[in-house]
Image (cartoon, rainbow, N blue to C red):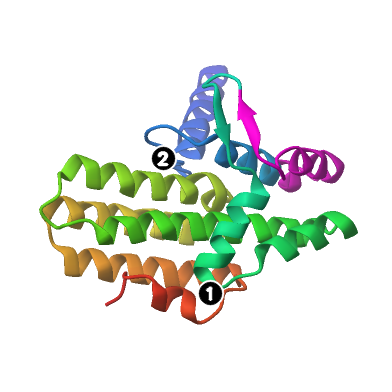
Amino acid sequence: MKKLFLLILVFLTTCFSNMSYSHQVVGEVAPLLSRMEIILRMIEAGKKDSAFRETEEVVEDFHNRELALHEEGLKTTMGRMDKKFGTDLQTSLDESIANKQVDSLQKTLQTLGFLLMLEKFDALQEMNKGSNLEAQKAIFWLGRNYFSLIIEPTLAKYDPALELRMDRLLDRALYRLEDGRWDEFRAAMSEFLNEMTEYFGLSLPPSVLNKSKISN
C-alpha cells in the first residue's frame, strides 16, 4: 500500500510539474530561432563555452541542409532589427563574444527574440481587419513562438507566477483576435509587451514601442 501511494505521488508530481510550464509552440520554427533556444538553454545549464561555440556557428548566414534554403544568421538578423528599431544589437553581440560575457550574450539574444516577436505582431497589425483569420492566427503564432522558446523558459524558472500570467495574457489576445475585437487585442498586447520590457530590463530605445502599432 505504501509503495502504491509513493507511485501515485510521483505520478501527480510529474503531472503538475509538466502543467506548470505550457511551452506552447505552433507551426514551423525557424532554424535560427531553434539555435537561439539551444544557446540560451546552454547558458542556463552553465555550459558557457558550448554556448559561445554555438553562437559563433550562426553569426554568419548559413545553409539549411534539410530545407535546402539560405538562412539569415545572427549578424544579418540583428542588422535588420537595428535598422528597424534603432537598437545596437550587432555591437552588443560582438562585445559579448570578444569578451566572453555570458550575461551580455543572454540579454542580447533575449532582446533579439523580443524584437523578432514584436516584428511579427506589427505585421499582424498591418493586415486588413477583413483578412483571412487563419492567416492572422498564423502570424500571431510566429510571434508567440519567440516568447515560448526564448523568453518563457526563463520566466518559468525564476518567476512561474508571471510566466503563467503572461501566457494567459497571450491567450486572451488570441481570443480577442479570433473575435475581431481589435481594440481589446491591442490592449492585451500592449500590457504584455510593456511587462516583458520592464521584467527583462531590455535595453531598448523609447521609440521602439512607439513604432509598434500595438497601443491602447
The image shows residue 12 at horizontal and vertical percentages of 47, 31
Would residue 51 be visible to someone looking at this image?
Answer: yes
Which numbered disc, 1 or 2, marks the residue that appears first in the sequence?
2
Amino acid type of disc 1?
Glu
Is residue 209 positioned above or below 75 on the image?
below
Name the mark on residue 211.
none
Name the mark on residue 198.
1
How many labels sit on residues?
A: 2
The image shows residue 48 at horizontal and vertical percentages of 83, 46
Under circle 1, the secondary element is: helix
Amino acid type of disc 2?
Gln
Would residue 158 be visible to someone looking at this image?
Answer: no
Q: Is residue 188 left or right of residue 210?
A: left
Residue at left offset 47%, top offset 44%: 20
Residue 190, picture quadrant: bottom left
How far apart are the alpha carbons under marks 1 and 2?
Answer: 23 Å
Q: Is residue 212 left or right of residue 92?
A: left
The image shows residue 103 at horizontal and vertical percentages of 77, 60
Residue 69, picture quadrant: top right
Give the crowd class for mark 2: few <14, some 14-19, many >=20 residues within 10 Å: few
Residue at left offset 57%, top offset 36%: 71
Q: Determine contact: label 1, label 2, CB under 8 Å.
A: no
The image shows residue 90 at horizontal and vertical percentages of 70, 61
Give the crowd class for mark 1: few <14, some 14-19, many >=20 residues within 10 Å: few
Residue 162 magenta = no
Is residue 117 positioned above or below 185 on the image?
above
Which residue is identified by label 2?
24
Residue 52 magenta = yes
Q: Which residues are magenta?
A: 42-64
Residue at left offset 51%, top offset 82%: 206
Q: Which of 54/43 is in front?
A: 54
